[in-house]
C-alpha cells in the first residue's frame, strides 16, 4: 500500500473526550472513529489489525479441531425464552419486533442457537465431541458505554461451544480451549493472567478468565505473588486475622446514638465501637420470577463494619436461597429508603438484624462466632451493643460476601494478596447441562440411554485484544504494535521524495519487500521527514526503513526498531535481508512466549 492513496487520518491533538490511552491513540493514529456512544467505525489500519487477530484465532481454533460456523445476529425470542435468558438479560439485550409483530433480539452470545442446532442434528455419542465456533458481531445495550473500545454496544467476538457425552469429555474440550487461548494471546503479544472467575448469568460450574493487567481495565484481579493463586474479585477469597472480642459474653444493651449515620460515625462516637467490631446491615430486594409471577423478597446482608459487599457474591448467595420450587432470582437491587423504613422501622444508619423475622438474612462468614458486637437497633438514633452473632441473629444462610482487599493473606499460602485492575480479553466456561436440559439437546450414550449433552462455551473479544495490546504497548510517541497484529509489519519511508535516487531505491525496495511476503506500507507522501517519522511512530509500525539522500550517497539506509526506538545504518543492498531476518526474529520471540 502507498500512504499517498491510503486513508490514515492521523490527528495532532489528543481528542478531548477520550479517557483511556488505547482510545486516545486509536483516534490519533487514524484507526477508529466514533459514530455514537459505544459505536465505532473501524478505518483501514484498524481493520487490518482486527483481521490479523481473527486469523490467529482461526488458526488456533482449527488446530484444536474447532469448526467454523456463521450464525445470525438476529435471533427469535422463543429460543431465549426456552433457555430462560429472555428475562435474565434484562435491559442489556437489544430487542425488536419484526413487521408481523414477532419478538426478536440481537444476540449477545449464541448458546441458544448452537444448542438448537445440536438438538436437531446430534443423535448419538458417536458424533461427539463437537466443537463449533464463529467470529461474529455481538450486541449489548450498555448502560454507560465508555472507554473507547473497552465498553461498547457492538463488538466482534469469537465464541466457541463444545458438546460432549460426559464430564471427562468436557474436561478435555475445556483444556484444549484453555491451551488454545494461551497460544492466541501469546501470539498477539499479550501478557495475561488466567484467573478463577464467577460464572454469573452464563450458568455452569467452572470458569476461567484471561485478564490483561492495565489501569484501563474495569475488573479487579486478586493474585498471590508467592503461589500464583489468581481470581477475580467476584471469586477471590482471603484469610483474615482473628479479632479479639473479649472473653466475657455480654448481654444486649440498647443505647442512644444521636446523629450516628455511618460506620465511621459510630467509631468516633463516645462508647461506640471500632469498625471491625460493628455489624453492617445492608438491605436489598431480590426480584424472583416463576413463569409470569414475580415477587419482591427483602434481603439483609450482614458484614463486618470495615468490609465491603461484593454484589456478585451476594447475588450468588441470594440465588441459592431463592432458586427453588420453580422460582428464579432475576435481579437483586438495593432497597429504596421507604422500603427500608417499611421493613425495619428505621432509616439507614440505625439498621440491624437482631430479632428480625421475615426478610432473608445472609451473614458474612467472617462474622461467625463473633460476640460483643455493635449494630443498629432498628430504631432511629439507637444502636445495640453486646450482640453475639450466633446467639442473637437467625441467618437464612452464611456466605462469603465480601471484597478481598490488598495485603490480606492468600487462601492457599501465607503470601500477601495483591489487587490490581485488569481487562478481560477471554472467558471460558464449563456450562454442563444448563442449556441442553432447558432446551432438550440429548444424544444416545454407549448404553443406548438418552442423555443430555454436556456443554462448554469459550469467548474472546476480538477488538479487546487490539485495545489491550495498545494499553500495554505504547509510549509518548504512540502505539508500539506487536508484529503479529500490526496493520503493517514494516513502513518504508523515503525522507525526501524530491530526490530521484531516494525515490528510485524506495520503489525498488517496496517491490522487493512485497515480493518477499512482507506487509509493507510505502510512505510515498510528499511530506517533511519530521512528519513522516512522527506519523510512523504514532501508528506504531514495528520496523521502519528510512532512506535519506545523504546516507544513500554512502550506500546506506537506516533501519529503525519502534519498540526500542533504536536505529542503525545498514547497507542499502542488504535492506531486504535485514528486514526479513528482523521480522522473523520478532515472530519467533512471540511464539517462544508460550511453551
Ligand atoms: Zn499464595
Image: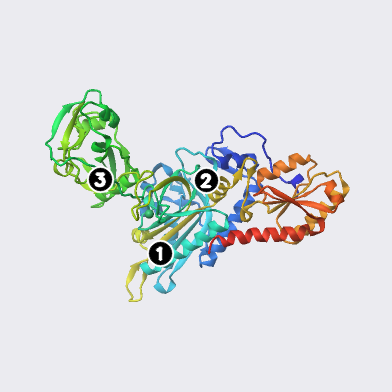
Q: Is residue 450 visible?
A: yes
Which residue is labeled 1 in the image?
119
Classify residue 388 as left or right of residue 124. left
Q: Going from the N terminus, do you reach mark 1 or mark 3 first?
A: 1
* Residue found 43% across the figure and 63% down from its top: 174
Query: Quick one: 13 or 213, which is closer to the camera?
Result: 213
Q: Going from the N terminus, do you reach mark 2 or mark 1 first?
A: 1
Give the foreground label among 2 and 1.
2
SS category of the residue bearing label 3: loop
Ligand 1 lies in which image quarter?
bottom left
Q: CA–CA distance between discs 1 and 3? A: 53 Å
Across and down, in percent, residue 78 comes to: 39, 52
Q: CA–CA distance between discs 2 and 1? A: 29 Å
**What is the quadrant of residue 301 in the picture?**
top left
SS category of the residue bearing label 2: strand
* Residue found 66% across the figure and 43% down from its top: 538
Give the foreground label among 3 and 2.
3
Classify residue 401 as left or right of residue 50. left
Which residue of the protein is positioned furthest toward the top in this rendering?
Answer: 258
Crowding at dot 1, Cα within 10 Å, few <14 / some 14-19 / many 20+, comes out as: some
- Determine which of the numbered discs, if any, sits on residue 154 in the image: 2
Query: Quick one: 207 or 129, which is closer to the camera?
Result: 207
The answer to whether 314 is drawn above or below residue 585 in the figure is above
**What is the quadrant of residue 172 in the picture?**
bottom left
Amino acid at each position: 500500500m502507498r500512504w499517498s492513496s491510503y486513508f490514515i487520518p492521523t490527528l495532532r491533538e489528543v481528542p478531548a473526550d477520550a479517557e483511556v490511552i488505547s482510545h486516545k491513540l486509536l483516534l490519533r493514529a487514524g484507526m477508529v472513529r466514533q459514530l455514537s456512544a459505544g459505536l465505532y467505525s473501524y478505518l483501514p489500519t484498524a481493520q487490518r489489525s482486527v483481521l490479523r487477530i481473527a486469523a490467529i484465532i482461526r488458526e488456533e481454533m482449527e488446530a484444536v479441531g474447532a469448526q467454523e460456523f456463521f450464525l445470525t445476529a438476529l435471533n427469535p425470542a422463543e429460543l431465549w425464552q426456552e433457555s430462560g435468558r429472555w428475562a435474565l438479560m434484562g435491559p442489556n439485550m437489544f430487542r425488536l419486533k419484526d413487521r408481523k409483530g414477532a419478538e426478536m433480539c440481537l444476540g449477545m452470545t449464541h448458546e441458544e442457537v448452537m444448542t438448537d442446532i445440536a438438538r436437531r442434528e446430534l443423535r448419538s455419542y458417536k458424533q461427539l465431541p463437537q466443537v463449533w465456533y464463529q467470529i461474529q458481531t455481538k450486541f449489548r445495550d450498555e448502560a454507560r458505554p465508555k472507554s473507547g473500545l473497552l465498553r461498547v454496544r457492538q463488538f466482534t467476538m469469537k465464541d466457541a461451544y463444545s458438546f460432549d457425552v460426559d464430564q471427562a469429555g468436557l474436561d478435555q474440550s475445556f483444556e484444549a480451549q484453555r491451551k488454545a487461548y494461551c497460544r492466541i494471546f501469546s501470539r498477539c503479544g499479550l501478557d495475561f493472567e488466567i484467573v478463577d472467575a464467577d460464572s454469573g448469568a452464563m450458568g455452569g460450574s467452572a470458569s476461567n478468565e484471561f485478564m490483561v493487567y492495565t489501569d484501563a481495565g474495569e475488573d479487579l484481579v486478586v493474585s498471590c505473588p508467592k503461589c500464583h493463586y489468581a481470581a477475580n474479585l467476584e471469586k477471590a477469597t482471603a484469610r483474615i486475622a482473628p479479632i479479639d472480642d473479649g472473653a466475657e459474653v455480654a448481654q444486649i444493651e440498647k443505647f442512644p446514638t444521636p446523629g450516628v449515620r455511618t460506620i465511621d460515625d459510630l467509631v468516633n462516637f463516645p462508647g461506640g465501637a471500632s469498625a471491625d467490631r460493628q455489624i453492617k446491615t445492608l438491605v436489598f430486594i431480590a426480584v424472583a420470577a416463576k413463569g409470569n409471577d414475580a415477587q419482591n423478597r427483602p434481603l439483609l446482608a450482614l458484614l463486618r463494619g470495615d468490609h465491603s459487599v461484593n454484589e456478585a457474591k451476594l447475588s450468588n448467595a441470594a440465588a441459592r436461597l431463592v432458586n427453588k420450587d420453580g422460582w428464579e432470582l432475576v435481579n437483586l437491587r438495593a432497597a429504596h429508603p421507604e422500603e427500608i423504613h417499611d421493613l425495619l422501622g428505621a432509616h439507614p444508619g440505625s439498621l440491624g438484624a437482631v430479632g428480625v423475622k421475615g426478610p432473608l438474612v445472609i451473614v458474612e462468614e467472617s462474622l461467625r462466632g463473633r460476640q460483643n458486637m455493635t449494630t443498629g437497633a432498628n430504631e432511629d438514633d439507637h444502636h445495640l451493643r453486646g450482640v453475639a452473632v450466633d446467639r442473637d441473629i437467625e441467618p437464612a444462610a452464611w456466605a462469603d460476601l465480601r471484597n478481598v482487599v490488598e495485603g490480606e493473606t492468600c487462601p492457599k499460602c501465607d503470601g500477601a494478596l495483591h489487587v490490581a485492575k485488569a481487562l478481560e480479553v477471554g472467558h471460558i466456561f464449563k456450562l454442563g447441562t444448563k442449556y441442553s436440559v432447558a432446551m432438550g439437546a440429548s444424544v444416545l450414550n454407549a448404553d443406548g440411554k438418552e442423555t443430555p449433552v454436556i456443554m462448554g462455551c469459550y469467548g474472546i473479544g476480538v477488538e479487546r485484544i487490539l485495545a489491550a495490546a495498545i494499553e500495554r504497548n505504547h509510549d509518548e510517541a504512540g502505539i508500539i504494535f506487536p508484529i503479529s497484529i500490526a496493520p503493517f509489519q514494516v513502513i518504508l519511508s523515503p525522507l525526501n521524495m524530491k530526490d530521484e535516487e531516494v525515490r528510485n531505491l524506495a520503489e525498488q525496495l517496496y517491490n522487493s519487500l512485497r515480493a518477499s511476503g512482507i506487509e509493507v506500507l510505502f510512505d510515498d507522501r510528499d511530506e517533511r521527514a519530521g512528519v513522516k517519522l512522527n506519523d510512523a511512530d504514532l501508528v506504531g509500525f514495528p520496523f521502519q526503513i528510512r532512506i535519506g539522500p545523504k546516507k544513500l550517497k554512502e550506500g546506506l539506509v537506516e533501519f529503525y526498531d519502534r519498540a526500542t526506538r533504536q536505529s542503525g545504518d545498514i547497507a542499502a543492498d542488504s535492506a531486504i535481508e535485514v528486514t526479513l531476518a528482523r521480522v522473523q526474529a520478532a515472530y519467533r520471540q512471540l511464539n517462544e512466549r508460550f511453551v
